[in-house]
Image (spheres, rainbow, N blue to C red):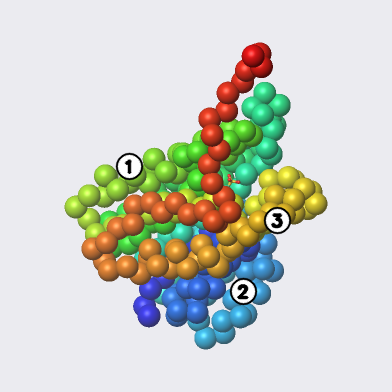
Amino acid sequence: MDKTILITGATAGFGKACANIFAENGWRLIICGRRENRLNDLRALFPDVDIHVRCLNVCDRKEVNSMLAELPEKYRRIDVLLNNAGLALGLNPAHEADLEDWDTMVDTNIKSLYFLTRAILPGMVQRNSGHIVNMGSVAGTWPYPGGNVYGATKAFVKQFSNNLRTDLLGTQIRVTNIEPGMADTEFSNVRFHGDDKKAEKVYLGTTPLTGPDIAEIVYWVATVPRHVNINALEVMPVCQSWAPFAVHRTTES
Ligand code: NDP
Ligand code: 8X3
């Protein structure tokens, strides 16, 4: 296997599970995240696989640029960019939400994603080969109370992915938006600012998606025949569905 994948947010959840499955299949990996010890632990699990570890904050453009500029020669041809790093912060209604949280979500889920994409795409276009896989969410399509800016960032990811496809028509480059529903990762612990009890309740009595569920899907979209582009893939656990339209009534009769 002579293929390289760059995975952002490989220290936990989907990114970590994706790193595992691609490593198990012999891909060369570039793994990023802020928790370096976790990246090193992951690399140690695969002593026979080429894994380049880079501790970085994806929101810091200088760090991202240095990471790309300093890639060892054999990691320079990136075949798949998995824009996975992301987060939700808070579940308050818009009029009570924390503006700092909104900024962080925009910086991480939107700006870092387009920055990495813009930096890596020219090489892909030059080689006429590559695949951008973005981690969207059902929240990018379906509104829910408290989803406000988080859902809006994922709507950006959805439309950006579709628009990339139109820009890249005529090339062999693929673009995919993965849109998962409820998955038990560190997502809710982060959303509730470390309130693990509150996070646990999100999954109570359910069988949510897991990191490995999503990793299998990402691996599949990255390995379908070259002429096939999975544009978008929405996936929920069986226990999740939609609600009826909510109607506020001022009277009962
Ligand atoms: P986790 O919290 O388990 O993992 C998030 C990953 O993103 C971590 O590796 C974290 O690394 C990384 N990350 C966050 N901010 C930064 C940053 N500034 N710089 C570098 N890395 C960062 O959550 P998930 O695995 O669930 O989330 C992964 C993606 O999937 C996100 O984009 C999320 O929105 C999306 N998603 C999640 C769903 C869910 O229900 N879990 C459903 C739909 C989509 P570190 O903290 O070490 O930097
Ligand atoms: C994560 C899924 O429903 O919590 O994107 O927004 S949800």
Question: Residue 120 placed where, x, y %?
Answer: 39, 56
Residue ID for mark 3: 205
Give the class, few, some or many, for how many residues have Cα within 10 Å of label 2's Cα (few <14, many ≥20). Answer: many
Image disc number at residue 163: 1
Q: What is the quadrant of the C terminus in the image? A: top right
Instruction: Specify whether residue 219 is in view.
Output: yes
Q: Is residue 141 left or right of residue 96?
A: left
Image disc number at residue 42: 2
Question: Tag 1: residue type?
Answer: Asn
Q: Are marks 1 and 3 in contact (CB under 8 Å)?
A: no
Looking at this view, name the residue that lies furthest to the left.
170
Please give the name of the residue rendered at 43% of the width and 60% of the height, measured from the top-left corner.
Answer: 81
Question: Residue 61 placed where, x, y %?
Answer: 53, 48
Question: Tag 3: residue type?
Answer: Gly
Q: What is the quadrant of the N terminus in the image? A: bottom left
Q: Nearer the viewer, residue 108 or 22?
A: 22
Question: Residue 158 placed where, x, y %?
Answer: 42, 43
Q: Nearer the viewer, residue 104 or 89?
A: 89
User: Looking at the picture, does residue 110 appear above or below residue 51?
Assistant: above
Question: Tag 2: residue type?
Answer: Leu
Counting the numbered discs, the total is: 3
Q: Is residue 252 left or right of residue 10?
A: right
Please give the name of the residue rendered at 45% of the width and 44% of the height, measured from the top-left corner.
Answer: 157
Gap in angstroms between the C-alphas marked 1 and 3? 39 Å
